[in-house]
Image (cartoon, helix red, strand yellow):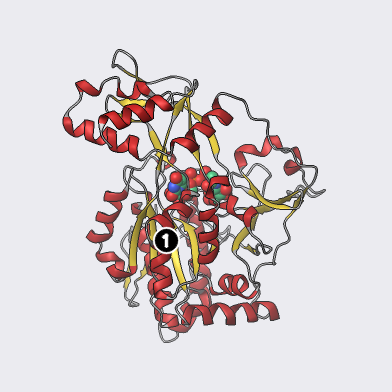
């Protein structure tokens, strides 16, 4: 796009001020600014400004909000679970399954400078979130004799750093050709009067367009085409921050394929109504996930049973399966996909060219959420309840709920159970708390059963911290802290 085309487009949408400093910036900056302007989806933005900024939208109202029907947690001896396992394992063996992780977010709450996936989460090895997820894929490839492609969604904020991190770590034992990075689009922020914001004289304030943007990026960046070429028709979706997620869980895949679901979700039982997770529910019969920030709009979602448990218990751990065909359909209908807004403090360059850091929210960022695709399903989405331990341990911050520190405790409990079952009992204090750090590479064992089987002729020394690597070798590097 050249300068005169940019001027025309901006004039058409009332955003001419973006070129206010054009003559004062370098040629490179001019080129970058024109590229940013060329990439903006102005018609969508205009609609969002009209609906969400210049007018105060009325919250959606529902006559009836009901809990979603869920499949209870897997019990391996239950007939439906056995059938699901068969179907899921067949799909994996046939190479029909790919993995996709959304890792384009900014991870602001963790206060970690770098892609969130490069956060060292292993208590002993300091292995990163990306390494854990990769080793799960290594374990699945070995178990099912397949080569699961892994699609990693990044954004402008972390694309280069993420790819460099994978290269520097030799792709964590996976083939580089089985890992594809794809980039979600950015969405400009707007101020309270609906004007786009310059964060530098030659740069717009933008944010990644939310994980719902994966639908657009999967098609635009050639991922669904790559999947189809490989014979993959089913994608296992997870968030980079969930250290414990069971990637491409054969039970979950089995329920999804055998029930003809287009998009499936795991749900976990919320412990408290205010837990910071979305809630899966049926709103006037339509499948929805109501985000935790919107709970107060729907007081029904805060109801509890006589024992104090949330009536709407189905928390959203953000673990899904999506069929490739469904992604293609949602892509075609994306003009109707819902957007969400957040009122934020957005630094900006004022008319005099000075950088201002506002003290209160001064503008909006817009995002789309993948779970809004659930309402577009033509067949009933499958919801499978999970127990949190060993499946859902997100890392959102350093301490407190869903933190690095709480993950450490859960990791100890999770793996202690495996070591106990394998005949290497783990020391606990009088309150039953595990007192050593433990760690098992998912490339060594993905499940407790696999661990017990692979550990058959081994006796581990569990008096101190103990890490088991992919090849079964051990290390005991750090004391408990
Ligand atoms: C999210 C879910 C919430 C769920 C919880 C489970 C949303 C809006 N809400 O909350 O319902 O219960 O996780 O842990 O997601 N990401 C991108 N691109 C983006 C934005 C986010 O890839 O543009 C990725 C992040 O890298 C991260 C994930 O999406 O992996 C979640 O984002 P985050 O902002 O941490 O969501 P939460 O508020 O924790």
Residue visible at 69% across and 35% down?
297
Q: Residue at x 69, y 67 (%)?
A: 71
Q: Which residue lies furthest to the left in this view?
A: 27
Q: Which is more toward the observer, 139 or 319?
A: 319
The answer to whether residue 23 is above or below residue 213 is: above
Q: Is residue 462 visible?
A: no
Q: Quadrant of residue 474?
A: bottom left
- The count of marks equals 1
Q: What element carries label 1?
A: loop
In front here: 406 or 476? 406
Q: Is residue 71 left or right of residue 36?
A: right
Alpha-carbon neighbours of circle 1 within 10 Å: few (<14), some, or many (≥20)? many
Q: Quadrant of the N terminus?
A: top left
Question: Residue 342, relative to residue 236: is it above or below?
Answer: above
Q: Is mark 1 within 8 Å of ligand 1?
A: no
Q: Which residue is located at x 38 percent, y 58 percent? A: 152
Return the x and y of residue 415 as percentages of the image width and height: 48, 67
Residue 263 on image: x %, y %: 59, 62
In percent of width and height, residue 192 lies at: 50, 22
Query: Measuring 80% from the left and 42% from the top, which residue is drawn there?
Result: 63
On screen, residue 122 above or below 160: below
Observer able to see residue 50: yes
Question: Residue farthest to the bottom?
Answer: 457
Q: Where is residue 342 in the image (x, y as percent from the top left)?
A: 52, 33
Give the residue at the far right of this rendering.
306
**Residue 297 versus residue 219: which sits nearer the camera?**
219
Residue of label 1: 437
Above or below for 304 versus 420: above
């Amino acid at each position: 796009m050249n300068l005169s085309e940019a001027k025309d487009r901006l004039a058409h949408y009332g955003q001419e001020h973006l070129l206010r400093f054009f003559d004062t910036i370098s040629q490179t900056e001019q080129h970058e600014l024109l590229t940013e302007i060329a990439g903006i989806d102005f018609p969508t933005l205009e609609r969002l400004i009209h609906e969400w900024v210049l007018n105060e939208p009325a919250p959606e109202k529902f006559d009836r909000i009901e809990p979603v029907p869920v499949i209870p947690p897997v019990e391996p001896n239950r007939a439906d679970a056995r059938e699901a396992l068969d179907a899921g394992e067949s799909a994996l063996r046939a190479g029909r399954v790919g993995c996709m992780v959304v890792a384009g977010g900014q991870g602001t709450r963790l206060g970690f400078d770098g892609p969130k996936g490069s956060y060292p989460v292993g208590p002993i090895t300091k292995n990163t979130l990306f390494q854990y997820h990769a080793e799960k894929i290594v374990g699945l490839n070995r178990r099912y004799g397949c080569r699961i492609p892994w699609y990693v969604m990044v954004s402008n904020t972390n694309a280069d750093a993420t790819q460099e991190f994978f290269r520097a770590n030799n792709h964590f034992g996976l083939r580089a050709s089985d890992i594809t990075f794809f980039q979600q689009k950015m969405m400009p922020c707007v101020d309270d009067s609906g004007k786009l914001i310059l964060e530098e004289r030659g740069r717009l304030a933008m944010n990644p367009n939310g994980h719902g943007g994966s639908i657009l990026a999967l098609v635009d960046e050639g991922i669904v085409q790559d999947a189809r070429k490989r014979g993959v028709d089913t994608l296992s979706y997870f968030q980079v921050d969930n250290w414990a997620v069971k990637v491409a869980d054969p039970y979950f895949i089995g329920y999804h394929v055998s029930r003809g679901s287009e998009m499936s979700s795991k749900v976990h039982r919320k412990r408290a109504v205010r837990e910071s997770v979305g809630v899966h529910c049926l709103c006037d019969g339509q499948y929805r996930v109501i985000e935790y920030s919107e709970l107060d709009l729907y007081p029904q979602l805060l109801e509890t049973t006589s024992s104090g448990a949330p009536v709407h218990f189905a928390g959203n751990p953000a673990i899904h399966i999506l069929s490739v065909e469904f992604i293609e359909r949602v892509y075609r209908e994306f003009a109707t996909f819902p957007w969400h807004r957040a009122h934020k403090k957005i630094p900006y360059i004022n008319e005099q060219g000075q950088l201002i850091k506002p003290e209160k929210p001064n503008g909006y960022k817009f995002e789309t959420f993948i779970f809004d695709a659930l309402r577009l399903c033509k067949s009933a989405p499958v919801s499978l309840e999970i127990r949190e331990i060993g499946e859902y341990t997100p890392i959102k911050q350093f301490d407190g709920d869903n933190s690095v520190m709480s993950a450490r405790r859960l990791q100890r409990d999770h793996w202690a159970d495996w070591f106990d079952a394998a005949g290497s009992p783990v020391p606990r204090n009088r309150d039953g708390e595990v007192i050593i750090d433990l760690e098992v590479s998912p490339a060594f064992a993905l499940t407790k059963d696999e661990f017990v089987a692979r550990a058959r002729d081994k006796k581990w020394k569990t008096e101190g911290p103990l890490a088991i690597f992919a090849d079964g070798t051990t290390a005991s590097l750090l004391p408990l802290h």
